[in-house]
Amino acid sequence: MKLIILDRDGVINFDSEQFIKKPEEWKPIPGSLEAIARLNQAGYRVVVATNQSGVGRGLFDMTALNAIHDKMHKACSLAGARIDAVFFCPHAADAHCQCRKPRSGMLEEIAARYNLSSLKGVPVVGDSLRDLQSATSLGAKLYLVLTGKGMKTQAAGGLPAGTQVFPDLAAVAAELV
């Protein structure tokens, strides 16, 4: 099975310092949905792994998060794309949970759900250092996109060894397929 794990905000859709709190605020980055469709057509199962601390902070509730994800799934469908699953951490940073990136718990859960003994070589795409750090210890193949926080992340340095940098998700998809 071919699997790819994507961060949501800044990779698939535009990010916001004020969080994406309702469906109207979720707007896809140009080319991202078509990139997911290309990955699907090449046999990839596309899974999203996203921190959503706005739930834990009380900025929005699970109903709003589900509505945002429903909008994302429908937008993908209109572009001929499919996201197989969305995994998320609803906890605020001070909860010290294992599922919040940069910890690896969410990605370990994805591996378990898909009956994978490891994520060695599985592409993980993010726009922040914590996205990459969550996958480093699991042997995943790391991709930083320069959308969202990606340019700041690259400028800050300290990327894990082997991280490949691409302008956006479309460029990652072109590389993989």
Image (cartoon, rainbow, N blue to C red):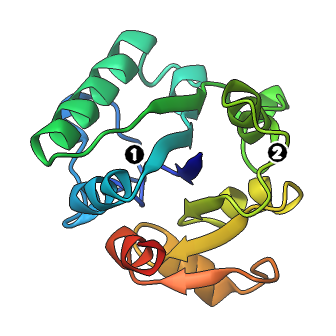
Q: Outermost residue, left direction?
A: 78
Q: Position of residue 150 (x, y in %)?
A: 51, 74
User: The residue under label 2 is which amino acid type?
Assistant: Arg
The residue beneath circle 1 is 18
Residue 18 drawn at (x, y percent): 39, 45
Q: Position of residue 40 (x, y in %)?
A: 35, 50
Query: What residue is rendered at 49% in x and 82% in y?
Result: 151
Q: Residue furthest right?
A: 137
Snapshot quadrant of residue 141:
bottom right
From the top left corner, tell me how far across and down residue 47 is, in percent: 51, 41
Q: Which residue type does callout 1 highlight?
A: Gln
Which of labels 1 and 2 is toward the front?
A: 2
| For marks 1 and 2 on the same chain, the one whose residue lies earlier in the sequence | 1
Q: Which residue is mark 2?
A: 103
Measure the alpha-carbon separation of dots 1 and 2: 23 Å
- Farthest residue to the top: give it: 63
Left of 97 or right of it: where is 150?
left
**Which residue is found at the position 82% from the left and 28% from the top?**
97
164 relative to 85 in the view: left or right: right
